[in-house]
Image: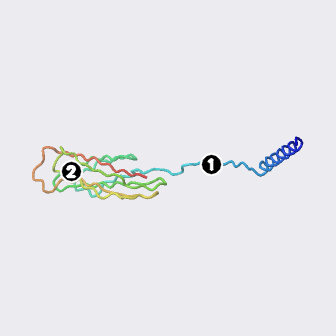
Amino acid sequence: MKSTKNIIIGALLVVILAMAIGYSAFATQLTINGTAEITGVWNVKIINVEAQDISEGCDPGTPEYTNTTVTFDSKLVKPGDSITYVVTIENAGTIDATLDNILFQEESEGSPAINYVTTEVAHELKAGQQTTFSIKVEYIKSTSEVPSIKTRKITGIVEYVQ
């Protein structure tokens, strides 16, 4: 009986050993390595500002701009005078841009005889495209007296997002 038990135990050990060898022969370890890289480029910027439609005798100054700001200084002479500034925006990146926020606000304490009119800004700006919008500054034609306050500032934000 002891020898039968020993034979059974030995046989079980041989079977377990055979199973372990079989498992390791058919087991494969898979290794996965990966790298992710961002290749998109975000580059929406102002590339030009040009004064157009300048009333006779008016001075548009020299508009200045950086990638993200525009500054101009208009000199208007009489009621009805105006200067239009055309701002060119370019999406020089590889990611399409969508207009998220636009706000133009005139200085409330400034001259009531000066008015700013802006055109619509493109809602979508695909990669590689350009768009323009204009800001017209005008000395209101119906003004009958020279105002005591002679300046009025405008502040604007045009914000594109991915």
In whole angstroms, how far apart are the C-alphas of marks 1 and 2? 63 Å
Secondary structure, mark 1, is: loop
- Residue 53, image x, y percentages: 27, 58
Identify the residue position indicated by label 2 in the image: 76
Q: Measured along the vertical axis of the image, is residue 50 above or below residue 151?
A: below
Quick one: which residue is furthest to the right in this view? Answer: 3
Residue occupying the far top of the picture = 2
Q: Is residue 161 left or right of residue 154?
A: right
- Which three-letter amino acid code belongs to the residue tagged 2? Leu
Of the numbered discs 1 and 2, the one sitting upstream in the chain is 1
| Camera-side residue of 46 and 11 | 11
Q: Residue furthest left?
A: 144
Q: Where residue 13 sits in the image (x, y, percent)?
A: 83, 44
Q: Provide the residue designation for mark 1.
A: 34
Instruction: Give me the residue at 17% from left, 56% from top.
Output: 80
Quadrant of the image containing the N terminus: top right
Query: Where residue 151 sits: x, y (%)?
Result: 20, 45
Q: Identify the residue shown where x is 44% and y is 58%.
A: 126
Q: How many marks?
A: 2
Indicate the quadrant where residue 7 lies. Answer: top right
Residue 18: numbered disc? none
Residue type at mark 1 is Gly
- Mark 2, Cα crowd under 10 Å, few <14 / some 14-19 / many 20+, is many
Q: Where is residue 14 drawn, in percent x and y? A: 84, 46
| Circle 2 SS class | loop
**Scheme of image coloration:** rainbow
- Give the residue displayed 88% in from the left and 40% down from the top: 2
Q: Nearer the viewer, residue 81 or 116?
A: 116
Front tag of 1 and 2: 1
Within-10-Å neighbours for mark 1: few <14, some 14–19, many 20+: few
